[in-house]
């Protein structure tokens, strides 16, 4: 098994797709505090690619296309698999209570209430407006 060189760095950026990506971008910014770094629209108003940042983190997202792409054919939306997720971003924040209150006010479906965890930190989990599962907390393994 090869290992990365000592002078390389790995950055992990979760990538999501939304049926109504323009609405999702607005919602993610108001509910979770993301900021638009780049948004590239298609002629029909759908989103070809967007980059949203939160402090030093980033997510990338785009619209679910009418005609599926090679990569996109490997992805399912939560409403296609019974409202379940197979992955969930965990976002480290300075104050989980602030994000919790913002998310609740924006209509996020809270599925694990805000609480102190046995392993340290404080956090919660919720579904966004299209059913993607998110977790926010102060636990920082670094």
Image (tube, rainbow, N blue to C red):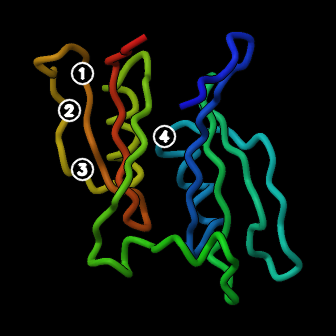
Cα separation between marks 2 and 4: 14 Å
Residue 114 has which mark?
2
Residue appearing at x 43%, y 24% in the figure: 92
Q: Looking at the rendering, which quadrant does residue 53 occupy?
A: top right
Cα separation between marks 3 and 4: 13 Å
Residue appearing at x 10%, y 18% in the figure: 118
Q: Which residue is mark 1?
A: 122
Residue, far left: 118
Disc 3 residue crowd, few under 14, some 14–19, many 20+, Cα 10 Å: some
* Coordinates of residue 67 in the picture (x, y in percent): 70, 89
Cα separation between marks 1 and 3: 15 Å
Q: Are marks 1 and 2 in contact (CB under 8 Å)?
A: yes
Cα separation between marks 3 and 2: 9 Å
Q: Are marks 3 and 2 in contact (CB under 8 Å)?
A: no
Q: Which residue is mark 3?
A: 110
Residue appearing at x 51%, y 70% in the figure: 75
Q: Looking at the rendering, which quadrant does residue 78 occupy?
A: bottom left
């Amino acid at each position: 098994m090869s290992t990365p060189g000592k002078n390389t760095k790995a950055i992990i950026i979760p990538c999501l797709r939304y049926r109504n990506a323009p609405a999702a971008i607005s919602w993610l910014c108001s509910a979770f505090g993301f900021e638009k770094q780049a948004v590239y629209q298609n002629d029909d108003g759908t989103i070809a690619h967007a980059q949203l940042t939160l402090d030093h983190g980033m997510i990338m997202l785009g619209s679910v296309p009418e005609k599926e792409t090679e990569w996109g054919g490997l992805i399912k939306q939560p409403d296609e698999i019974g409202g379940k997720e197979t992955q969930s971003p965990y976002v480290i924040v300075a104050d989980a209570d602030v994000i919790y209150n913002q998310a609740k006010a924006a209509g996020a479906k809270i599925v694990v209430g805000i609480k102190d965890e046995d392993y340290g930190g404080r956090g919660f989990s919720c579904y966004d407006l299209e059913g993607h599962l998110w977790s926010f907390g102060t636990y920082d393994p670094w």
